[in-house]
Image (cartoon, rainbow, N blue to C red):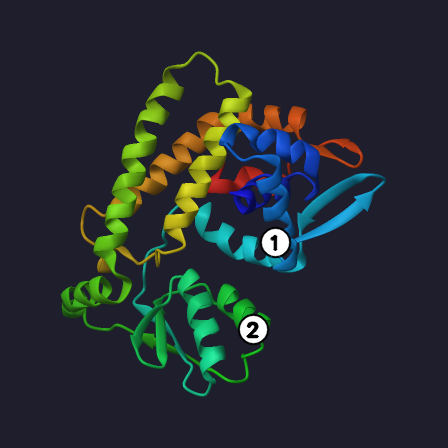
Amino acid sequence: LIVTVFCDTVSQHGNAVWLGSLIDALAPFGLNQRLIRTSVYRLVKDDWLRAEQVGRRSYYSLSGTGMRHYQKAARRIYSDGAERWDGSWTLVMNASLVDRERDTLRRELQWLGYGNLTPGIMAHPNHDRRSLDETLQELRVADKVTVLSARTEDIVSREVLRKLAFKTWKLNRLAQRYEAFLSAFRPILRSVRGAAKPDPEQAFQIRTLLIHEYRRILLRDADLPDEMLPSRWPGRAALTLTANLYRVVEAAARRFIAHALETAEGPMPPCTSSYFDRFGGL
């Protein structure tokens, strides 16, 4: 949850926050001061966050590594929908890696949506090469793997592709998680739309929990093209719901952020212009 706050909020408002104000903002989530301090300390140890001491106050921001993780995830979380698929694939052959390197790469590529086609080969249909190249460079394995491009030529093979997708990306389990997400947040969207004006603190809580839960599911999703998915895939509805609810509460949430969260210079600065590009435009 703390990672979500840093990625969804702090990164867009100067990328620094006073720990004391963060503790106060997260208290309504049921997180006590000790738990937050312990979690932030671990995130620093794991190189997600970096700390700066100014007087007696501690300020935290996403580290270089944390920012790179956020940027890769943000391209998917705040997307305005999948592009039309041209049948192309990106294949990563990792047979030359030692076991530890292979396990680390497999985990990182799974977060990018890659699936294991066969032992030693991971694949994604028409995946963003920038995120792949960044990951290979970060793990220092760019010169140890082979990246290939392939193409699905025969339209008749779509049924085969659907069966492959269900097996490789475990779509049944993913669909269940999306359905649970929709059941949880649809009533919230109806309630907020029916309210005269969203409460800023509540809007911040809704926005944070919305992205937190959506991110947890989406980073297990492969963003497969429609040709490989069932006709009523719940992931599409989840994206629409997330974008709509985010738009309803984001302005009120920003008012809370400006009031409640602090930097070394005072209140958090206004959000970056790129923030308004989320979900195709806020």
Q: Residues within 10 Å of mark 1 (few under 14, many from 20)?
A: few
- Residue 165 at x, y percent in the picture: 24, 64
Calculate the distance from the C-alpha at mark 1 to the C-alpha at mark 2: 21 Å
Looking at the rendered structure, the secondary structure element under dot 2 is: loop
Which residue lies at the image location 34% right of the left edge and 38% below the top edge?
Answer: 240
The amino acid beneath tag 1 is Arg
Instruction: Residue 112: tell me if it is visible.
Output: no
Element at label 1: helix
Residue under the point 43% across and 47% down: 215
Q: Which residue is mark 1?
A: 42
Q: Quadrant of residue 162?
A: bottom left
154 or 197, which lies in front?
197
Q: From the viewer's perspective, is residue 94 above or below residue 43?
A: below
Is residue 151 placed above or below 246 in the rendered structure?
below
Q: Nearer the viewer, mark 1 or mark 2?
A: 1
The residue at which mark 2 appears reads as: 139
* Res. 73 visible in picture: yes
Residue shown at the point (50%, 32%) measured from the top left: 30
